[in-house]
Image (cartoon, rainbow, N blue to C red):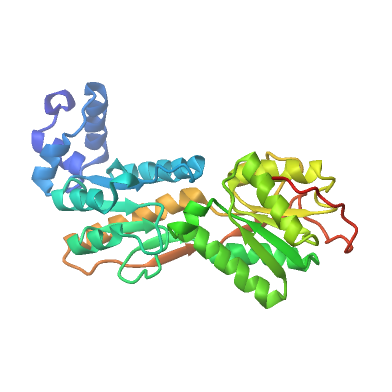
Amino acid sequence: MARRAGVSASTVSYVLSGKRAISESTRQRVERAVSELGYHPNAGARALAGRRSHIIALVVPLRADVYVPIMMEIAISVTTSARQHGYDVLLITNDEGADGVRRVAASGLADGVILMDVELEDKRIPALLANGTPAALIGLPADPRGLSCVDHDFAAAGALCTDHLADLGHREIAFIGYGAGVYDRHAGYAERTITGFRERAEQRGVRYVHRACEGTYESTAGVLSRILADRPETTGFVVQNEGAIGPLLSLLRAGGRTVPEDASVIALCPEQLAEQYAPRLTAVTGPAQELGRVAVDQVMGTIAATANGGDREDRLVLLSPVLTVRESTGPAPRQGSHPRVEERT
């Protein structure tokens, strides 16, 4: 490669490592030679030379109850952000649990680790802390002290949903959430959303009910039937379950409830999903790509601080949710003006 670029081998090394200033014309000749020869630095040799692997391990969830498009959007953001720092990404599935995290941290295979799908009492976190590996969490555990975390402010998102419906005059609201398994494992995003929703409902004097839902048509039908049997005056629905949105709209329509005249629906979901339905959904959203970018920046900051003998950079970043009002929410109907919906089993 040095011969192809017409420079010394040390100059090639300086261009690739960035350890010394090189003139623009020389740098361009080296980069052109790299491109023409299809050169890729050997990760093992680079790790031996610099005592770094230039790899970030990303622990991704493989669960039936997660919304895969969002998880993939975050993973892509992590990958592209890492490449801007000269790092590659190693994907690890969360079914390896704490043992998998411990193995990667202890082996030196990765310079840093990013955890996704964080639970309130996540068993993977002690493994990271014990090893001292630079890490960031995309999610918020019950105790974030000593950790770098980035997440949507799900408590604020739940409160936004309550405020929007309460401001429209709705006094009976139902929250249709994820399946029971998500709450059983205390997934942070689900727990924090319902906490924010409940606390604001109590502050606003709004009656509410929370029901877990598996997201299928049949489970959504059963949940809606039970809600209306227990709370027939319910006029507002908050949905934090992407799979339940379509069935809920269809079931309300089939039962003679027009959205938003008879029932208002607000969803916690991506913008593109909210735009797909008729009527278009009022939704509370957050930037998924920003989660990946911030997490990578946090890991890189900790790696740099550790290399320079400084303290670990531990910080918490909560991204503010955004409420976009569309056609699925409107003023609460007069009491007794909506039709009865037959109970489904």
Write down the quadrant of residue 157 in the picture.
Answer: bottom right
Where residue 251 appears, as percent x and y from the top left, is 75, 43
Instruction: Work out which quarter of the rendered image holds the C terminus and state it.
Output: top right
Q: Say left or right for 225 vs 319.
A: right
**At x 75% / y 57%, what residue is drawn?**
229
Where residue 142 appears, as percent x and y from the top left, is 40, 68
**At x 24% / y 24%, what residue is drawn?**
38
Along the line of sight, the residue nearer the viewer: 8 or 232? 232
Q: Using the image, determine if residue 28 lies above or below residue 120.
A: above
- In the rendered image, is residue 31 in sight? yes
Where residue 115 appears, as percent x and y from the top left, is 34, 53
Along the line of sight, the residue nearer the viewer: 4 or 60? 60
Q: Say left or right for 200 vs 142.
A: right
Q: Say left or right for 297 vs 134.
A: right
Q: Using the image, determine if residue 290 lies above or below residue 172.
A: above
Write down the quadrant of residue 324 in the picture.
Answer: bottom right
- In the rendered image, is residue 153 in sight? no
Count of numbered labels shown in the rendering: 0
Along the line of sight, the residue nearer the viewer: 296 or 158? 158
Q: Say left or right for 86 vs 193.
A: left
Instruction: Work out which quarter of the rendered image holds the N terminus and state it.
Output: top left
Where residue 178 appears, as percent x and y from the top left, is 55, 52
**At x 36% / y 42%, what residue is drawn?**
79
Q: Using the image, determine if residue 201 lies above or below residue 242.
A: below
